Each structure stands twice: as structure tokens, then as C-alpha cells.
Image (cartoon, helix red, strand yellow):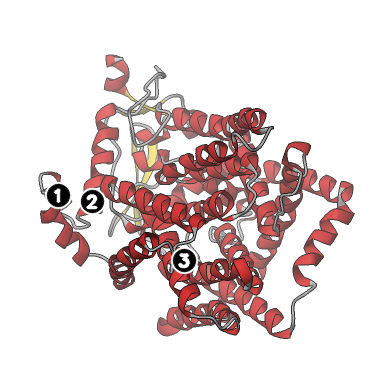
């Protein structure tokens, strides 16, 4: 826990001044009010883009960390007074109960994030991907070893940047995610103090949203998942675009673009900047020039993302073969990409070994089996959606639905429906599904509960739920302060068979398909027999011999 807390502090002290520098520029100033979470998110977004650029020439390890820390120290010295006031303003008005609740949130998240990673994708490829990022500059054709290794998420760059892999002490793959979740918990907890007047509905929304988020991603906090950070960035984008009285379009463009580089399944967020520009087109005289700046910001974020995709797989968007404009030697065969995209889609519909049955199944045929495979919490969310949707329609018809909430409900419902149809894994549409349920529940709470003190009571459910999650994780003695006091609990050990296939050293698990944090390259099975090294070293990349000859 101590080491994870240190890394969290390092992320905070690095991201805050960088985000402050971005949000204090003349184009971003004015009457906009920013929270400390805004500075953190802006800073992390820029750190991801910078790390992506650096990854073309350097592994994301010691040297990039020192360079970015030096830049952050310079900014702290340059803007010390403003940054100090910004930090102190967050804590100045807290009473004793709020201080205790904040401490509980921080300690509980440290405990939850330092257990042994258990999320299945961490074992399949997330930990392996981060090792490749730590060890080498972006590797050409890495997706030829396994296409999962080409699933480029910029949040894995942040994880690699701050995981201190060069010390060989322990893995810290959950530290960045834990920091971000903690920042959101504290932000939403503090925001509920403004539960009066026009903000009462907003306060209820924050309470419901963070409780839903914590419950939905229970068990993920120690794993280097891209789904959870993408969901957090998506929630921030919805808040910035649709809940605030004044929206900074440039900041919104940065957050939306960064969210998409974390996880492509949040692509419906790209509609939000368009909505904001449309709203302000006639009322804001500078919106036309700001729209140009928005495009430049999005390009700065997307360009290294697309570049990394092309280097990793030969395609700008993975897993898709669309926009195939790059005739590179290391391109992953198109059939491999298409087959994997098909597996993602139909496995989401039928998450069973015989998922291929879902290919030819009608909606009414695969839906019952899909429902039966969902976790109990997701089933509760589904029933809540079925109940809340007609209630919100009735409130709209009778003119009782807040105008801003209407837009959130429509956007969230349509976005979640699109992702559901494309690939109905609940984690893919959590970023839109959770706001829909939270804003619906907030509407009902605001209409039926007039006692403001109940909001203050309800917000204390956040630290209470975290305590319950700690106790739940501890049911099998997975949490032990003695084991977790200094470092996170290691990844589980995996027995592997080591072999060399056409000059490529490969480790393959003897039991199951998960490598977890075994030394790279580790794969769930032997790679395609036609995969070759582009040179003599792993970092030089990989290509498929027959595919290259056919090109």
C-alpha cells in the first residue's frame, strides 16, 4: 500500500501542473469553473499523448518518467502559489466527518487495488502488453504474435510510465487505475455537499453514479484494465458536455479524444463536442475559432494513437481492417483481424465456449442465453432499466423532466443501445448505461425526497460501500495488511513451457490460457507458423511470411 500510495502521489503531482497549464491558457480561461479533477484529467490526457509520442523512440520506463517529472517540477516551481491554493481549496472547508470519510475512501481503495490482479483480461494480455511497453519502443507487427497485443490502449502507457518496472521490486499495474478511481470517488463525494437549489438533482446523480460505478467494477481495481479508465473518462465527458452550465469545448475535445484512445468502444462520445458546438454556434462569438482549436487538440491526441496502431498491426483501427491505407511489411493478415472481431462480437452475445452458435442466431434466440450468463448485479441493472425507462418517458410527457437531463437520457440510452447491438458485453456499455440509470434515479429522488439532509446521509454510502467491498474481498483472505503494507500482492504464478519457434523465444502456460505477468513473450498458444522476426531482436518486430509475399 505504501508504494502504491507513493505512485498515486507521483501521478497527482505530475498530472496536476500539466493540466493546470492546459486549462489556464487564454483560450480556456473565462467564466468556466474547474474542479481539481478537471486539472488531473487534463494532465493525464496530455501525459498519455506525450507517452504515446515518446513510445515511438523509447520504452516507457525510467527515462520518459524522469523527463516528465522534470517538466512537472519546473511547472510546480513556476506556478507554485496558484497550484498550492488549488490543492488547499479542496480540503479547506471539510469538517471532521468529511476528513474521516476521505481517509476511508483512500485507504479502502489502496487495499482493494493491491490485491493480486484477478480480471481475466489482465491474465490474457494486459500485463503482457504493459511489459512490452516497459521493455521496448512500440514493436512493429506485434499483433502477429497475437492480435490482442495490438489492442492499443493509451491508459496502458500511463500504467507503464508509473509502474517503476526498472526497479524490479513488484508490479504496480493497479496504481494508476486506483488513483483515478480514488480521485473520482472524492470528487463525487465532495460534490454532493452542494445539494441545494438547482444542484439537488446533480447531487443525487453523483451519489448514485459513484455507487453504481464502484459496484459494477468490483474486483477490477487491482487489474490494469482499460474498461474502467475509459468509463471514468466517459463519465467526465458527459458531465462536462451536458451537466455544466458553461462548457469549455476545447477541454471537452481533449477528454473525449483521450477516452477513445483508451477504449474504442466509447466512440459515441464523439457526438458530444458536436452537440456543444451546435448549442453555442449562435450565442458564443468565438465558437468558430474554438472549433478549429478543438480539431487541433483532437488531432494531437489521435495522431500518435493511430500511429501506434499502424506500427502494432498495420491498421489504423483495431480490430478493424477499414481504412487500410498502409502497405507495411508487418501487417497482420486481414483474415486474422476479421476472425478476432467476429469472436469479440459473438462471444459477447454468447459468453460460452460454443459462442459461434450466436453467429446465425436471431436476437430472440441469443438474448435469453446472454441474460443467463450475466452477473447478478448486471441483471439488477437490466431490470432497473426496464422499470426506469417508462417512468422517465412519463415524466417527459407530463413536463416534469429537467431539460438537461433529457439530453443525457437520450444520449446515454442511444449510445448504450448501439454498443449493445455491436458487442453486448456489459463492460463495453457501462460508460453510457450507468449514467442513464443514475440520472433516472436522481430524477425520481429529487421529485420524491425533499429533505436535503438525506443527500448528506446518502453520500456517506460511498465510503460505506468501499468498506463493504473490502470486507467482501477479504472473505477468502485475499486482503491482508501484512502482505500488502509495502507492495501489491504479486500476480499468480504460472507454470510455462519455454520453447523457440523460428528464432522467437516463447513461453506457453501449461494449464489454461493466461500468462499473467510471466516474462515476455508469453502466449496462450504457439504463434502462427509463418510468423517471422523482422530482424534478429524482438524489438525489431514480426511479420507473417505468406501474407508479406502476397502483398
Report the front residue among 181 and 537.
181
Along the polypeptide, which appears first: circle 2 or circle 1? Answer: 2
Assess whether mark 2 and mark 3 are in contact (beta carbons under 8 angstroms).
no
Q: Quadrant of residue 433?
A: bottom left
User: Mark 2: few, some, or many residues within 10 Å (few <14, many ≥20)?
Assistant: many
In the rendered image, the vertical position of residue 365 relative to residue 304, given as above or below: below
Look at the numbered disc 3 and give the secondary structure of its residue: helix
Residue pointed to by mark 2 = 347
Q: Please give the name of the residue rendered at 29% of the width and 42% of the height, measured from the top-left corner.
A: 526
In the rendered image, the vertical position of residue 33 relative to residue 204, given as above or below: above
Residue pointed to by mark 1 = 358
In-image side of 46 versus 319 (left or right) = right
Q: Please give the name of the residue rendered at 49% of the width and 56% of the height, measured from the top-left corner.
A: 403
Give the percent coordinates (x, y) of residue 250.
64, 39
The circle on residue 213 is 3
Q: Please give the name of the residue rendered at 29% of the width and 51% of the height, measured from the top-left corner.
A: 420
Residue 299 in view here: yes
Along the polypeptide, which appears first: circle 3 or circle 1? Answer: 3
Report the front residue among 134 and 5.
5
User: Mark 1: few, some, or many residues within 10 Å (few <14, many ≥20)?
Assistant: many
In-image side of 407 versus 2 (left or right) = left
Give the percent coordinates (x, y) of residue 41.
63, 51
Assess whether mark 1 and mark 2 are in contact (beta carbons under 8 angstroms).
yes
Q: Quadrant of residue 143?
A: top left
Give the percent coordinates (x, y) of residue 120.
36, 59
Image quadrant occupied by the N terminus: bottom right
Give the percent coordinates (x, y) of residue 32.
71, 50
Residue 1 in view here: no
Look at the numbered disc 2 and give the secondary structure of its residue: helix
Amino acid at each position: 500500500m505504501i508504494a502504491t500510495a507513493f505512485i498515486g502521489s507521483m501521478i497527482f503531482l505530475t498530472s496536476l501542473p500539466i493540466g493546470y497549464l492546459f486549462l489556464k491558457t487564454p483560450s480556456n480561461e473565462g467564466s468556466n469553473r474547474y474542479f481539481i479533477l478537471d486539472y488531473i484529467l487534463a494532465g493525464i490526457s496530455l501525459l498519455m499523448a506525450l507517452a504515446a509520442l515518446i513510445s515511438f523512440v523509447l520504452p516507457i520506463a525510467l527515462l520518459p518518467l524522469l523527463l516528465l517529472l522534470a517538466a512537472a517540477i519546473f511547472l510546480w516551481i513556476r506556478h507554485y502559489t496558484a497550484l498550492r491554493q488549488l490543492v488547499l481549496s479542496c480540503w479547506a472547508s471539510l469538517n471532521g466527518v468529511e476528513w474521516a470519510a476521505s481517509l476511508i475512501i483512500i485507504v479502502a481503495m489502496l487495499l482493494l487495488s493491491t490485491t493480486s490482479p484477478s480480471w481475466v483480461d489482465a491474465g490474457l494480455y494486459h500485463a503482457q502488453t504493459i511489459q512490452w511497453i516497459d521493455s521496448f519502443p512500440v514493436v512493429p507487427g506485434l499483433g502477429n504474435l497475437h492480435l490482442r497485443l495490438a489492442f492499443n490502449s493509451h491508459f496502458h502507457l500511463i500504467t507503464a510510465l508509473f509502474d517503476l518496472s526498472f526497479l524490479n521490486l513488484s508490479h504496480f499495474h493497479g496504481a494508476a487505475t486506483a488513483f483515478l478511481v480514488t480521485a473520482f470517488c472524492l470528487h463525487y463525494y465532495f460534490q454532493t455537499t452542494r445539494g441545494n437549489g438547482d444542484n439537488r438533482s446533480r447531487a443525487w446523480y453523483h451519489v448514485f453514479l459513484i455507487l453504481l460505478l464502484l459496484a459494477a467494477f468490483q474486483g477490477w481495481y487491482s487489474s490494469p484494465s482499460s474498461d474502467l479508465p475509459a468509463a471514468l473518462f466517459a463519465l467526465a465527458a458527459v458531465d462536462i458536455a451536458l451537466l455544466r452550465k458553461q462548457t469549455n469545448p476545447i477541454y471537452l475535445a481533449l477528454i473525449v479524444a483521450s477516452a477513445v484512445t483508451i477504449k474504442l468502444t466509447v466512440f459515441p462520445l464523439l457526438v458530444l463536442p458536436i452537440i456543444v458546438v451546435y448549442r453555442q454556434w449562435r450565442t458564443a462569438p468565438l465558437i468558430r475559432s474554438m472549433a478549429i482549436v478543438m480539431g487541433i487538440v483532437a488531432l494531437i491526441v489521435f495522431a500518435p494513437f493511430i500511429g501506434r496502431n499502424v506500427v502494432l498491426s498495420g491498421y489504423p483501427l483495431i480490430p478493424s481492417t477499414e481504412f487500410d491505407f498502409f502497405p507495411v511489411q508487418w501487417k497482420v493478415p486481414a483474415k486474422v483481424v476479421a476472425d478476432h472481431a467476429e469472436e469479440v462480437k459473438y462471444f459477447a452475445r454468447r459468453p460460452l465456449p460454443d459462442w459461434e452458435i450466436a453467429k446465425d442466431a436471431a436476437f430472440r434466440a441469443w438474448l435469453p442465453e446472454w441474460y443467463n450468463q450475466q452477473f447478478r448485479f448486471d441483471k439488477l441493472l437490466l431490470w432497473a432499466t426496464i422499470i426506469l425507462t417508462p417512468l422517465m418517458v412519463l415524466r417527459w410527457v407530463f413536463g416534469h423532466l429537467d431539460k438537461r437531463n433529457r439530453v443525457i437520457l437520450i444520449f446515454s440510452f442511444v449510445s448504450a443501445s448501439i454498443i449493445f447491438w455491436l458487442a453486448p458485453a456489459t463492460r463495453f456499455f457501462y460508460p453510457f448505461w450507468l449514467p442513464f440509470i443514475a440520472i433516472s434515479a436522481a430524477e425520481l429522488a429529487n421529485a420524491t425526497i425533499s429533505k436535503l439532509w438525506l443527500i448528506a446521509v446518502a453520500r456517506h454510502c460511498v465510503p460505506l460501500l468501499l468498506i463493504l467491498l473490502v470486507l467482501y474481498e477479504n472473505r477468502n483472505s485475499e486482503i491482508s495488511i501484512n502482505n500488502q503494507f509495502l507492495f501489491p500482492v504479486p500476480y499468480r504464478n504460472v507454470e510455462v513451457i519455454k520453447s523457440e519457434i523460428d528464432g522467437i523465444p516463447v513461453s506457453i502456460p501449461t494449464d489454461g490460457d493466461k500468462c499473467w505477468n510471466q516474462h515476455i513473450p508469453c502466449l496462450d498458444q504457439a504463434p502462427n507458423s509463418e510468423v517471422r522476426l523482422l530482424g534478429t531482436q524482438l524489438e525489431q518486430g514480426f511479420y507473417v511470411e505468406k501474407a508479406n509475399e502476397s502483398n
